[in-house]
Amino acid sequence: MTVDLNLVGAKGAIAEAAEGKWGMTIDQDICTGCQACVAACAMENNVAFVGEEDAGYGRTQHWIRIERFWDGEYPHVKATPFQPMLCQQCGHAPCEPVCPVFATPHSPAEDLNLQVYNRCVGTRYCANNCPFQVRSFNWRDYHIIPELGNMVNGTLVFPLHNQLNPDVTVRRRGVMEKCTFCIQRIHHAQDTAKSEGREVEDGEFTTACAQACPASAITFGRVDHPESLVSQMAHQERGVKHLEELNTLPRVTYLKEG
Amino acid sequence: MSEATLLAIFEDLDPAANAIDTLHEMGVGDENINVISGVPVAHKILGRPHPWTNVSKLSMGGAVAGFAFGIFLNFGTPHLYGIQVGGQYVTPIPPGAIVTFEMTMLFALLATFLGVFLDSYFPNYRPLEYVDEVSDGKIAVFFRVAEDDAKKFTDAMNTLGAESVKPAEARQL
Amino acid sequence: MSQKISRRNFLKLATAGAATTAVLTGCGPASRYVTREPYTKMPEYTYNGLSTYYATTCRECAAGCGLIVRTMQGRAIKVEGNPANPINLGKTCARGQATLHGLYNPDRVEFPIKQGRSAALGTTAMKWEEAFQIVADAMNNANASEIAFLLGTASDHLFDLITDFTTAIGAPAPVRFGALSMFESRATLSQAAENLLGEAGLPFFDLANSDLVVSFGSNFLETWLSPVAYTRGFAKMRRGNTQKRGYLIQFESQMSQTAAKADEWIPVLPGTEGLIALALGRLVAEAKGGSTPRAFASVNVEEVSAKSGVSLEQLEHIAGLIAQAQAPLAVPGGQALGQSNGLSTAEAVLALNALADNYGKPGGVFISPLSPNEDAYHRPASAKEMADFIATLKNGSVKTLFIHGVNPLFEIPKPLGFVEALASVPTVISFATFPDETALASDYIFPDHQGLEAWGYQRSATGAMHSVLSGAQPVVSPMHDTRSTADVLIEAARLAGGKFAEALPFTDEVAFIRSKIANLIGRADGSFAAPEINTFASYFQQSGGWWSAAGASASSSAASALGKTIVIDEAAFAGDGEFFFIPFISPTLGEAGANKPWLQELPDPMTTVMWNSWVAMNPETAHHLGVENDDVVKIISEAGEVEVAVYEYPAIHPEVVAMPFGQGHTAYGRFATAKLPQDRFLGLVPHGGLIGDAFQRGANPADVLGAHFNKAGDLAFAGMKVKIEKTGRKQYLSRLESRIGVYGEGFPEEK
Amino acid sequence: MTASSKYLSGAHEAHDAHHEEDPKQYLMYDPKPRGEMNAMVMESMHTTSWKFWVVLGVLSFLVVTCFFFAWGYMIDEGLYVGGVMRPAYWGVFLVNTVFWIGISHAGTFISAILRVFKAEFRRPFTRAAELMTTFGLIQAGASIFMHMGRVWLSYWMFPIPNARQLWPNFHSPLMWDLLAISTYVLGSTMYLFLPLIPDLAMARDRSTGWRKTFYKILALGFRGTEGEWRHLTVAMNFFAFAIIPVMFSVHTIVSWDFAMAMRPGWSSSVFGPYFVLGALHSGMGAVAMVLFVMRATMKHMDYFIRKEHFDALGKLMLMVTFAYTYFFFNDYIVQWYGGDKATDNLLHWLEEGPMAWMFLQFVFFNIVIPPLLLWSKKVRETPWLLALIGLMINVGMYWERYLIIPVMLTINRMPFTWKLFQPRLEIFLTIGTFSMFLLFYMIVSRLIPLIPVWEVQEGQMTHSLRKVGKAKLPTISEFE
């Protein structure tokens, strides 16, 4: 490639100015915390369930989790607005440089923070360095725990495997994983558009979470297209980004209450 | 005419030094004398010429090679398959400094170690002239003289207080 | 790089081939010959080809949301909402997403079984021919009056078929029941509508166009009636109007997920919601000036404030808000209706709407339109009606009981005595898809298809102002040797011959469904029109149902409602305990989600507890009882007792304890019962753990519910008072949230 | 201890005791003929009691079960058998890594820095310390690999041409670690071997049977000619100077694994020197323990290892303690004063959270106790006491690393995820690494001369007592 990577990747003015390409807004004012996005994400991306003990010990594999805090004391107590937390696809992702094997590089094409499962050796540095704590690690082969299968004349079969999405890798033990903004859907849409000789239109496709959300609290699209719905949402005055002070350039904008 | 290698063993450094002087006087050149000791003995104590060594040169060579390798790793390899991470330069200087430093040191140390092997022909399991007393702190002086003068030199050494003077024979260590 | 490009070309080539395989998928006869291999065995560099999408209807609850299921090579791999269906407009809830884990559940009943009421699921398969014969005999050997059908709330086509059948042979009409309907108090709602508006039917509350919603215990964001539709309405209410942000006020004794979204959550004493509604009505009327309508005349505001624990200021403040709002809307529901005075509470709330004069207006109350092929609103049985049905079973007047789509042994309060009733029925035939408690307790299990393998249709009771009939079709060929119950009955009737055969003169289920939608042919006001049945049926299949374009209407006069006098009698509470006991349907599990692992893994929105159940009590209460988080307590009511772990819940009335319904199965598959075996290498990690029976996961609040009904016959599930005892045992609840970060444990100074 | 009892009994005698201090109590002024020393060292290698074999057996059993079996089990099952989770993605394995690298620093410090500064008391125990370096690094390396999720692919981190056409990421502190540690391992092993050659030759001349061949092969045919000595000494000098920056870089880079991360508590610019000092702190303590054990268990060691050495070591420890305290306080007060919310939470957590006991122990063992005791010569000269202090320091330092890794990881910027780490299989694997370290040490103590005899003799030759007036004054001369 001819592009000077030194300039493209440079911290400072150039990247600073870049809006990013794919982005998301989450309206906390209407998010009802119903977990539909979590389920949809799990179904779309073959996210494993881990069972009661591991789940309680902090080994859930959720790529998106919904946070809820308390504010005040009874009877004036309020639950803080539900806050879906997923990979923010940072422009300057702290998780990226620390990986010794380039398992989580930045993709110039989508301007997303990729996770290359088959490259990962499981040092878990990226997860430590993620200020949002949205990376989940495969502590064991959750998909092939024997108890999930049935013994059918001598061989162990896993009926649940029929549900797995063929467009998404099933992760084995020792591999880090995280939200990918449903990159398989992005690519599918791009391929279709290309074969029809056109650009991908706004709202032509969306991520699994946004698609399921009954309240339509999640919007996904091109933040670098000013006319796209997502960038219009993002530029409201109630839009904020999490831990902005860390200058990781998150691509997810949260719309606060009020 | 044939030559004989004699081996004189001394209890202490001073007689050994005198012995070497005497040998010089008696016309035995430094190239025909060798000293074996249980501890490192500086050449000036025995009045021997400064022994030559390549080790330091090799270390420097290693350092240079290591430096080059470090540079290659940090500034070469990324261009074989450039990947952006964390909005950093593909070939940043500060990590480069670390990589280069470590590689320089590693190669320098390796070269030094190998240098010792090269210079002193290690490992060497061929039979060699040697006496076990050396590792008990004795000083052994080898010198090569004409067959006929052997007697003369033996007496000279004995008068100088050599514990024993005998023709040295190479043996399996 | 070059390597990559060549690979991409290769993939392009592969497309054509893959596409052809995709065509074979789905429900055509060819699909039977497509071999299913999990993608975990997929060879490298396989291009996935194209997916095929099938429209069908969700059967996780009775709302009738339209689904589009993505299938690939004979496999259903993703559930997506049907954007055309007016109920959910392309959206789904978590339970809808997880329906795939029902389809591929490792614990399905895979073939017809002679169960013989044994504790463990039978393992020897029967032939379907025998099964048909058994059903036929069951019909023949009993006179019509001795055959009874107990059905779940989905799906409607089976209900219609059986209704036709029973009416034809003169058997008692089928009874429909379900935990969801039990907690929704549908009877109360339609009764109240009838009393006040003279029009039966489910009221539909148009949140979307309202700007102020006052909810009386209604949990419309969770499981109530049509959660997806109401969630959409809520979102529109909040953010749809760019000028004004909609405002939500919730009166509820514990902060439910819905209350958590409220701008003002006002904890009240259970049973006083109706009084509050009246008081508000009075205050609003006074604020608006003019005479106080008779409906509110009788109430004494101070008294209400004293009884409910809502301060006068608060009442006046809220009344002020209602008075100023352009389109205020009051919604009854949830625990407010599950009281002995639930009916009058519902009336009071509807009267409040009448005062706001919002009937039939945008942002107001409508009567949900009937479904296209529905003569009148068929609501599921109320608990009272269920009790009567059980009584008939008990007195031995039923020889054969057919059960489909419902799990009464788990769902029905013990005092209704379903266990004994079952014992007094000679033959119990279950059509269960999963080995649930009731299925195990029956003589035969003739498994029905899972929803995604089945034909059918579902009438949407409410959720949209359209008249909707959601169509269901198989999206995959059946995984196992199961048969559609409709087909089984048709076949059996044919074998039985005589009036039975005449009652069901259909070649198969599909023919029956076509006969049921035939009346829509030629209707021009619908989502599509077709001249004859074949075209119509294929459109119906393709678009996932038929719905009228026209909106619904509420032809009711507010005045008549306001004219009535409404008296809220004192709520009666059964039992002599010191705590009000409020059971509620788990928003993530619903009534039957416990066997779907990903639903178990979903944290409860409010407590973030996974894989287990809990009892929520105010920390103050816990302290007073001398218990803390994860302590197992025994909850004792007049009807029974249950052991469950404590969750110190900061947003609940100190006199109230709340417990989710959905866990506590003793059967129903590995995920619903015994916990997944975990690594026990050192056992240093105390999470998880089991209460009581080692094969029971969590606890079932139905075990402590008594048999008390409100005036409309719905169960007064919130009308219990319970005692709470320590057991001294611990049971560590698996939470997603951090107790350190959220509750400041380990930070002594902070709290 | 007679001298010291006098010391207690009264000022006057004490004064005398000092006055009549006998230079022969110092190894360097108490020379023995080389042959005798050789014999002593050889004997110390040969004599083993039944106790030795029992301990050896127990250790090897522990290594087999707790190291190899446990690790295999973990590789087969996945890391879930350990205690790691979100947010403590790093656990005890990296604690062990940092700890062992810390231990390894003592060897280099003593044999290199003291060599450079010509501190003569180092001579008898440079090798003992160097062995700690090598074996410590082996354990550190092992722990790193244990920590990896897919250890069977760990070679992907090595900068070697590969089919994936992908080179490792040199932005990553872990990559720096890999390079630095491998440099350090190789360097220190070579540095251990070079001064060993003459002693191997000595052993070769004095043994028979398999030992003969063993030493013969290792001694590489060393005779002690002028040339050989010259090359050796030049090389050793170079190593002495070159290994020091490597040693500092290694632990600095280890500290950067944490300091580079965007986390409260970790992102601190003082971590580099702080960790280096921490390493020396634990390293010195470990040396004290090793010397004590050597002296107590091996024959003739009381000749080579004397009070003077413990005394000197104690002084070093005291010095290091002060330096360490300085850096600890420096790091702590900066974090504390900053008042950043996340950091505040973290400090709160450390001081009052469930792991506060660990924090307190760490502060007492590393910062409070050593200075209180080590100032007294009597304590410094009591081997078991010094060893005990060494033990305390090491426990403290282990807690310090434990606090920095799993406990600090509990607190991050997402309070919703905070969870406390609980070790599981890690406990066994930790036992495994410790047993392996001890096992190696025991085996080697019977295979190679732990005392560099030639260095001792060289030292004794350069030291002499010169008579000035009535007093005999120690004098040191330079051979080079």
Image: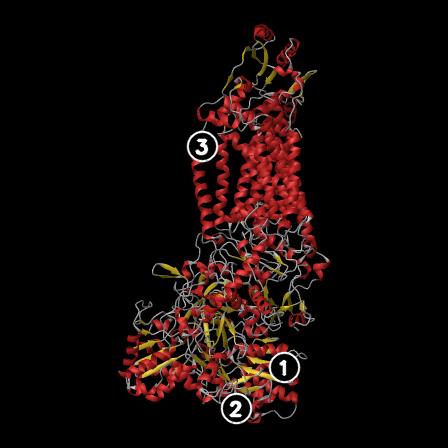
Q: Residue C703: where, in percent of width, then height?
A: 41, 72
Neighbourhood count class around disc 2 (C-alpha, 10 Å): few under 14, some 14–19, many 20 upward: many
Marked residue chain, label 2: C
Identify residue for label 1: C211
Q: CA–CA distance between discs 3 and 1?
A: 85 Å
Q: Of D89 and C383, which appears nearest the observer?
A: D89
Provide the secondary structure element on which disc 1 rests: loop
Q: Residue D84: where, in percent of width, then height?
A: 52, 53
Question: What's the residue type where badge 2 is placed?
Answer: Leu
Residue D28 picture quarter: top right
Question: What's the residue type where badge 3 is placed?
Answer: Phe
Marked residue chain, label 3: D
Q: Of D250 and C702, which appears nearest the observer?
A: D250
Q: Residue C468: where, in percent of width, then height?
A: 50, 84
Task: Pick whichever of labels 1 and 2 is earlier in the sequence.
Answer: 2
Q: Which mark is residue C196?
A: 2
Neighbourhood count class around disc 1 (C-alpha, 10 Å): few under 14, some 14–19, many 20 upward: many
Q: Residue C504: where, in percent of width, then height?
A: 34, 85
Provide the secondary structure element on which disc 3 rests: helix
Q: Which mark is residue C361?
A: none
For the question of whether residue C580 can be seen, the reply is no
Residue at the extreme left: C141
Identify residue for label 3: D52
